[in-house]
Each structure stands twice: as structure tokens, then as C-alpha cells.
Amino acid sequence: MRKINVRLITEKIRRLCIEASIVLSDEMLEAFDQAIEKEESPLGLVILKALKENARIAREERIPICQDTGFAVVFIELGQDVHLMGGDLKEAIQEGVRQGYQDGYLRKSICHPLTRVNTGDNTPAVIHMDIVPGDRIKITVAPKGGGSENMSRVAMLTPAEGIEGIKNYVIQRVKESGPNPCPPVIAGVGIGGTFERAALLAKKSLLRPLGSKNPNPELEKLEEEILTGINKLGIGPQGAGGRVTALAVHILMMPCHYASLPVAVNIQCHAHRYRETVI
């Protein structure tokens, strides 16, 4: 049994909150380059180049990529052979978020849903935890902006709607979102499970490295078809028109009830931020 003090988790979360908000990944920068090659709209090109320049400045000047530094969503894969010491794991995670947003001078956006009073420290974070084999802990912090999160939806399709129904629903969701989620977007899609599981699958799908292929050939084909359909909508970068509305479509799937076909779409904006580490 490997012993890990939760203070180490607090420190890791603190650092991940700051790094995720400041440094856009190399894979996203490559996606911008590919989008610049594809985009035919002059205004769309200007916007894509501005987004890439914004990412460069943020990385070099150590300032947030976007003023909306997001809701801290934390994914934990906890090895079953780990013995945690020194305190409560969930509180250690919340403390890491608290310190990260304070020390990184990141905007604190979390509030009481009815009174709209800010909690003051960007907590509570949303924590998703899985128990996995082994003696390690994998931590992923994915700050989620409000604009793109607002455009996300879950639908309970009928089984008869099938693959065509799924494709139509995802493309229509992006169409209805228009410029609101700050395109070019990444569309995370969850298929199957239950109502709430489909939403989690959609969010988890966004953690797959951008540009990587889905290991399931059937889903890889479906991702390509949906991406093509989205990019035919003509919404373009920041909704100004053009060929590049989405950079990628990511799908996660699991079995569902015979009578159901849950589908969730979690839209991510061009500030596709997440950082991970393994202890």
C-alpha cells in the first residue's frame, strides 16, 4: 500500500489550475495552424490568427488565455492501492482550487445560483472520482467557461432515431449555439448510459488529446461525419462566417437501456484548457 499525503494533492491542484488557465496545449496550437490552412473566409483567417497570437501572449506573459477562467472541474483516478494520509481528500482538492485561483490571480466566477452572491474563492469545484487499479493518482483539472457550458445539452432520443438521429442532434445543437460558445469549438459527445452518465461521457470525451483518433473505428467514422456536417454550417470562427466552426468532435459511448438512447453534447470553446499529472 503506497502512502500519499493529501497536501501533495492540494499543491498539484493549485499548480494545475494556474497552468491550465495560462498555457494552451501544443495540440491546440497545431489545431489553429490546421484551421488557418483550411479557412477561406478573410475575416475568419484574421480571427484564427488572433486566437493563436492570444495564446502565445498568454503563455509568454503568464496571463489567462480568457477572462473567464472557468468552473474548476477536477477528474481523479484514485489507485485502489493508495493509502491517503493527512486529511480529507475532497477538502484537499477544494483547497488546491482555492489556492490556485487566489495565487494565479484568476477570475473567481462561482456563485450561489439564486442570490448570485460569489463564493469568493471559485469553490466548490466539481469533482469526478474513479477508483482504478494500481498505486497512483491521476489528476486532471479542466476549467470550463460559462459561455460554452451554457450551450451544452442532454437529449433522450428514441432508439428508432439511431445513428442519423444522433448526427442530426449534435449538428443541430452546434447550429443553434451559433457564435455563443466562441467557435471554433470542440464538440464532446456522450452516447448511451443514463441521463446523467451521458453528460459525464460528453465532458470526459473532451479530455482525449486533440487530433488523436477514436480507438473505436465506428466512432471514429461518426466523429468525422459529424465534424464535416458542423463545418458545413458556415458559422465560422467567432461566428463571423467560414469553414472552420469546429476543430474536432470527440465521442465516448457506453451501453444503455433497451428503451433509451441518451445523447449529450458538451461544447468546448477555442480556449480548450486542461492539465493533468500523475502522482
Image (tube, rainbow, N blue to C red):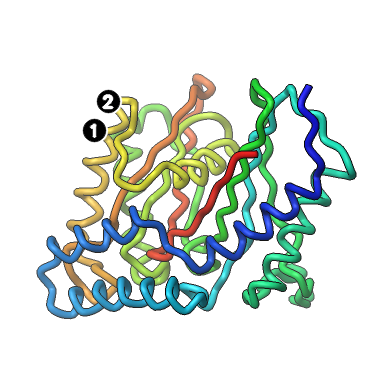
Image vertical order of residue 30 relative to residue 139, above or below: below
Q: Secondary structure at mark 1?
A: helix
Residue 250 locus on image (x, y percent): 37, 42
**Front residue of 11 and 264:** 11
- Asked where in the image residue 267 lies, by quadrant, the reply is bottom left
Q: Is residue 5 left or right of residue 74?
A: right
Classify the position of the N terminus by image quarter. top right
Residue 221 locus on image (x, y percent): 23, 33
Residue 263 locus on image (x, y percent): 45, 39
Q: Residue at x 32, y 73 (%)?
A: 51
Residue 5 has which mark? none
Q: Residue at x 44, y 48 (%)?
A: 265
- Asked where in the image residue 19 lies, by quadrant, the reply is bottom right
Residue under label 1 = 221
Are the residues flagged by discs 2 and 1 in contact, CB closer than 8 Å? yes
**Front residue of 169 and 11:** 11
Classify the position of the C terminus by image quarter. top right
Image vertical order of residue 119 relative to residue 134, above or below: below
Q: Secondary structure at mark 2?
A: helix
Q: CA distance from mark 2 to mark 1?
A: 6 Å
Residue type pointed to by label 1:
Lys
Q: Residue furthest left?
A: 40
Q: Looking at the image, how many numbered discs can be counted on the residues?
A: 2
Residue under label 2 = 217
Q: Is residue 135 left or right of residue 58?
A: right
Q: Is residue 145 left or right of residue 209?
A: right
Residue 182 locus on image (x, y percent): 38, 70
